[in-house]
Image (cartoon, rainbow, N blue to C red):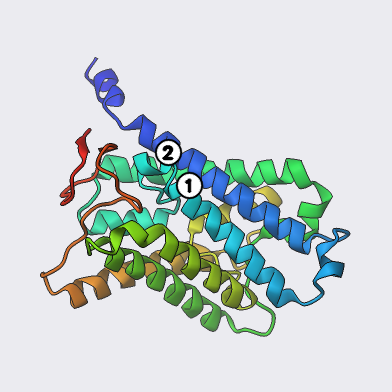
Amino acid sequence: MNTFTSWKTLNWSEYGAEVLGTAFNLFVGFSIITFNFGKGLPMERLIPAESPRLLINGLIFAGSGALFAISPLGKLSGAHLNPCLSMAFWLQGKMHKRDLLGYIIGQFIGAIFGTFLSFFLWRNYFVSTNYCITSPGIGHPLWYVFLAEVFMTSLLVLSIFIFLSHHQLMRWTPLMVWLLVATMVWLGVPISGTSLNTARSVGPALLAWSWQDQWLYFLAPPLGALVAVGVFRLIAMGERELLTGKLFHVPNYRCIFKNVKVPHLKK
């Protein structure tokens, strides 16, 4: 009976929101990648240069995540959509361990679902993009790719932390994330594929059952998140702290995070 009661007290609504948000983000992202780079589709002829198509990928891929953050489900869960980001919030004392586990499992389930949904929609066009797998760019040594992923993930997490530690900036966090990630996709895909998110890399690798060099994306993004936590603590010097664990915090939504310093409904 105690076990059953403890299961009931878990925050299933938030975990479910992370499943749906991650699936939505990757479905939109993989669809725009396929539309822009799938063999036989018109964008290859309409825009021959890769750079503009990468920028479009970034704006729409990252934009879907930012859009989810300001949606009702995103306002509920906080729209992490990334196990590395959730881990960083936990390290900063904003999440309970059980919620961290629920978020991470939800994000991986969502990533797998979003990947398979993209495949069923686009079929051979999706396959022609190598299943949207993140992979090192041609001509770049693996150490350089690894450091690029560490740097980009740390910059993303650190930027989120900086915005969420200022009352004036926190409302603009989704917009900042949109523009920052779009730029990283635009400039970083030729180097590393711009994962930033282990769940994002696992979905396509699982579908294609192709694990070559995927260790990079299991290690580099989490390491980048750890670096960001360390840098934030260094620059904050105990004078600043995260105000919330949500990318877009509004007071009329319940909040399951710890040590929240802005108005919110209790869980």
User: In this view of the protein, can residue 117 be seen by the observer?
Assistant: yes
**Left or right of residue 209: residue 98:** left
Residue 35 sits in which quadrant?
Answer: bottom right
x, y (%) of residue 133? Answer: 66, 60
x, y (%) of residue 211? Answer: 63, 60
Q: Mark 1 is on which residue type?
A: Phe
Image mark for residue 68: 1
Residue picked out by circle 2: 73
x, y (%) of residue 55? Answer: 63, 70
232 or 90: which is nearer to us? Answer: 232
Q: Quadrant of the N terminus?
A: top left
x, y (%) of residue 203? Answer: 59, 50
Q: Quadrant of the C terminus?
A: top left
Q: Mark 2 is on which residue type?
A: Leu
Could you give the CA–CA distance between mark 2 and mark 1, rounded to whole angstroms? 7 Å
Say which label, 2 or 1, has the lower sequence index.
Answer: 1
